[in-house]
Image (tube, coloured by chain):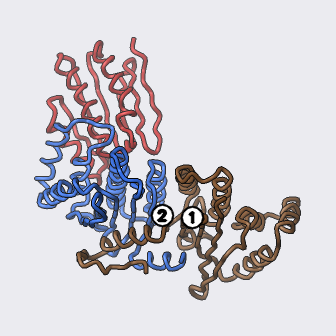
Chain colours: A blue, B brown, C red
Amino acid sequence: MTYSYFKNMQVNNVIFVYQGEVTADLVSSILQMMENKLDGDGEDKKVKKKVFNVMVECLQNVYHHLDALETSNVSGKINDKRALLMIGKEDTDYYVITGNYILNERVNAVKEKLERVNKCDKEELKKLYQEILSNEEMSDKGTAGLGMIDIARKSGQKLGFDFHYVNEMYSFFSLEAKVSRVQP
Amino acid sequence: MIFNTNDKNYHISGPLQFSYPCFIDMLSNNLIFMYRGIVTSDLVTHVLQIMEERLEEDKASKKTSKKVFNVMVECLRNVYFDEISEEKSEFEATAILIVKSEEDGYLVSTGNYLKNTEVDALKNRLDKINQMDGEKLKVYYQELLASPVAEKGLSSLGMIDIARKSKQKIAYQFQTVNEFFTFFTLEAKVIKK
Amino acid sequence: MLKPLKIEPTHKTPRVYLEPETNTFELGGRSIPEDSVGFYKPILEWMDAYAENPNPKTEFKFELEYFNTSSSKNILELLKKLEAIFNKGNEVHIIWYYDEDDEDMEETGEDYKALLQVPLELVMKAHY
């Protein structure tokens, strides 16, 4: 079992995959590990910064998001703190993928938000970012709307996403952000 | 088995397409967690923390929790490196950790690369320990404790500890990768009490 | 006199040096804590106290390397407190440093500049 998992993960140039409960400390260790890895790989400073930024935002997004789910009244069947984190390096891009449960009732809103972000060009994203930054209420949960725009801005590419129906309560939501390994 | 993409709704390309199947696979196999990548001691600490909380949630007995925790500590010691030194390439520092919940207990499994030259010695040590019963393990443990020889990586002491705490033979597997490296898998199961 | 506020940096939180006596006001490094509100609360409270009796001239330096969106709101709050001091007729000068090759940090500086009336100067740090 163990070896087949390991081998499968190699196919997609995966730097790491984690599946399980996500805690703040775990996110920090992963970020630190990735930072060392990017340093060790001698990646371009600009690329390194962007990858790190996108990683922070994506990973913390999941962490905060899951926290939100925990407070809602959920069935004990699904361990709602479980998530998937995956970072990989392809010839042209780094990719950061996160996956987590999302309440079905929120799917449409998140989808619309993503579609809206994906339709924006650089200037529009900037405007949207400033708008939300100055209007949205501050919360200790972070600002998910702002996070998404920030990821899109720093990634400089369209966000990939995918929703899967799990049961009457939940869907599984995957988000992918890419950072080009060639920065102008 | 792992990336089952029979789902008709599936037309996402690139690595994103693996996200959902990966996750579903984990659920159907009852994996508590799975990590594959460079393993640092910091990461190990936090993974252990998560596991500790998880065992509490599972209402596992104190005894079982302690055992699982100890077995994890020993198994993980085998796979992490604080820094990627020159002798240990990134390739060698990349490992996999899996904790699986089974009906009667928990399965802890690690996998990592070894130099082919290290295989025989490790295998001999594992076999030696697997042949011993509880009493013999105890004696051997005390003997090794008193001996001044320090071993690198998964030590005999660590193995004995795993064997004693899991009360089972240690399952292992060596898979030759190429002329230099072998993939070594270790599996220890702790039965719920 | 208001006691200086000194917070040493960690791998997740920035260094914060606020010392009216020597006219030192600095925030630098990385700001990526999960709980940014908790981290910034004492800083914002300190700024409130400082605003009651500020120096005639306040020069505040931001020298951030990374920050997450959860910090961005708090940083805006901090900037707004500086703006309030400025609006009361005090001299306030904010310098936003960014690395030569860090266009994201430059853009964020521009974002803040667009949202504020208080003078905010963007300064590039060249590599030597």
Along the line of sight, the residue nearer the viewer: B161 or B113: B161
Compared to residue C30, the image places residue C4 above or below, namely above
Neighbours of disc 2 within 10 Å: few (<14), some (14-19), many (20+)? few
Nearest the viewer among A64 and B88 is A64
The residue tagged 2 is: A40
Marks 1 and 2, how far apart in space?
Answer: 9 Å
Q: Is residue B99 above or below residue A146?
A: below
> What residue appears at the point 22 percent right and 53 percent down from the top-left corner?
A106
Q: Is residue A170 left or right of residue B93?
A: left
Query: Does C22 sit left or right of A92 as displayed?
Result: right
Name the secondary structure under disc 2. helix
Residue A86, quarter of picture: bottom left
The C terminus of chain B appears in which quarter of the rendering?
bottom right
Residue B39: percent from the left, percent from the top?
54, 63
Q: Chain of mark 1?
A: B
**Image marks 1 and 2: residues in contact by CB distance under 8 Å:** yes
**Looking at the picture, how far across and down is residue B115, in whole percent?**
64, 79
Front residue (pair C17, A52): A52
Residue designated by label 1: B84
Indicate whether A14 appears above or below A29.
below
Whether residue A49 can be seen here = no
Q: Chain of mark 2?
A: A
In the shown orientation, is residue A127 left or right of residue B128? Answer: left
Asked if badge 1 and badge 2 are on a common chain, one would say: no
What residue is at 28 percent from the left and 77 percent from the top? B7
Instruction: Give left or right: position of B108 versus B22.
Output: right
Q: Amino acid at mark 1?
A: Ile
